[in-house]
Image: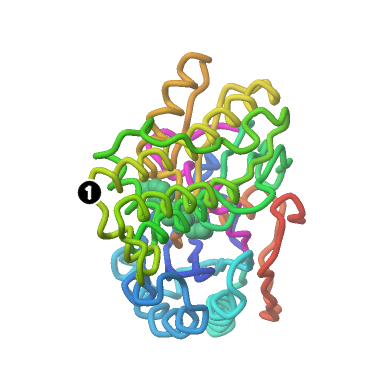
Amino acid sequence: MQKEPSDLRVLGIESSCDETGVALVRSRPDGVPMLLAHALHSQIDMHQAYGGVVPELASRDHIRRVLPLARQVMQAADCSLRQVDVVAYTRGPGLAGALLVGAAVACALGAGLGKPVLGVHHLEGHLLSPFLSADPPAFPFVALLVSGGHTQLMRVDGVGQYRLLGETIDDAAGEAFDKSAKLMGLPYPGGPALSRLAQQGDPAAFRLPRPLLHSGNLDFSFAGLKTAVMVQARKLVAAHGLAEGLALDQAMRQLPATTRADLAASTEAAIVEVLVKKSVAAMAHAGLARLVVAGGVGANRLLRQQLGEAMAHRGVRVHYPELDLCTDNGAMIALAGAMRLQSGRQQASTEYAFDVRPRWPLDQITA
Ligand code: KG4
Ligand code: ZN
């Protein structure tokens, strides 16, 4: 018997980058699904030795982790795989090999269980993830998507109704954090490490550029900032007589702790100021009073604090996913699958033929 889309158990599988995530979500008649259980394995320790994600290692590790995580989720939800109604997986964007693991496992599970499957857009998962929080948003809203690969402002009128307002023309905000952190000698992933170091520093210590701050549109650019951080780092290293025979990141590690903290704080302040000012401009442009912030950089404390202050003045409510659902996870994929089915924008398929879309603009998502 075909079940109503308002009463489905959706298993979600995320494997687009360096986190394997699995979750079980149950859709509800009020349209806001409930998270029954989720489990996550981060590959950070494995990639740390290389200073960034190694795609082939990522794919192999997803293969090892995904089924044990699925078992863990089913146990935590006290549910059997037979009770799953739909299997949702991340179809893109992301690393091709890593995506293929999740897609293949989801389709194999679906075929084995005789249940339909659904490919989900990773950013749609991030964007909708605050619906699983204690303070869910309501449509329409503006979304600031800030991850390792994307920096976008979107107008969101409903599930699948996304209009791009502005985006980065080069590096993403997360990339700016990660690349600056790397050249300061901090471990991967640099965002959280840089942010921690910044807490002891003076954000006004170094003058760094705020790219495109007054561009008059809602686009971002972070590549120049990263270069400015590098130039500043070289100056500091030379001023301390550390340049000889050392790579920049090694030399940076030998600087006084306060100097490194000052550079970290100045870098974080520059990134956050641009994100906050562009978000303020986007709210005015869209004429809306709700902002959703999603993606890994949404976990940043300074960003949360400064957005909170700027938006409170303007009567705008800011919604975030729960902190553990800010970075990649399976819950947002199960959620996006459940919400797409419930909105009637997409049907799950029993063809089990899959492809992945490593590059896939969110506003080109089709029903
Ligand atoms: O959304 P996400 O988990 O993966 C992608 O889809 O990219 O985002 C990861 C990014 C990384 O660049 C990481 O450094 C950044 O989010 N990030 C942070 C923080 N936590 C994660 N950046 C700044 N401050 C943080 N607290
Ligand atoms: Zn992500």
Q: Is residue 83 left or right of residue 160?
A: left
The number of callouts visible is 1
Is residue 75 covered in magenta? no
User: What's the magenta region?
Assistant: 119-139
Q: Residue at x 50, y 69 (%)?
A: 17
SS assignment at label 1: helix
Residue 133 found in image quarter: top left
Q: Where in the figure is residue 351, as x and y percent of width and height?
A: 71, 79
Q: Is residue 317 visible?
A: yes
Q: Which residue is mark 1?
A: 257
Residue 331 found in image quarter: bottom left
Q: Where in the figure is residue 158, as x and y percent of width and height?
A: 66, 39
Q: Residue at x 46, y 34 (%)?
A: 207
Q: Where in the figure is residue 233, as x and y percent of width and height?
A: 41, 52
Q: Residue at x 70, y 40 (%)?
A: 166
Task: Tell me the amino acid under the disc marked 1.
Answer: Ala
Q: Is residue 205 above or below residue 108?
A: above
Q: Is residue 41 visible?
A: no
The quarter of the picture showing ligand 1: bottom left
Q: Is residue 170 left or right of residue 319?
A: right
Q: Where in the figure is residue 157, as x and y percent of width and height?
A: 68, 35
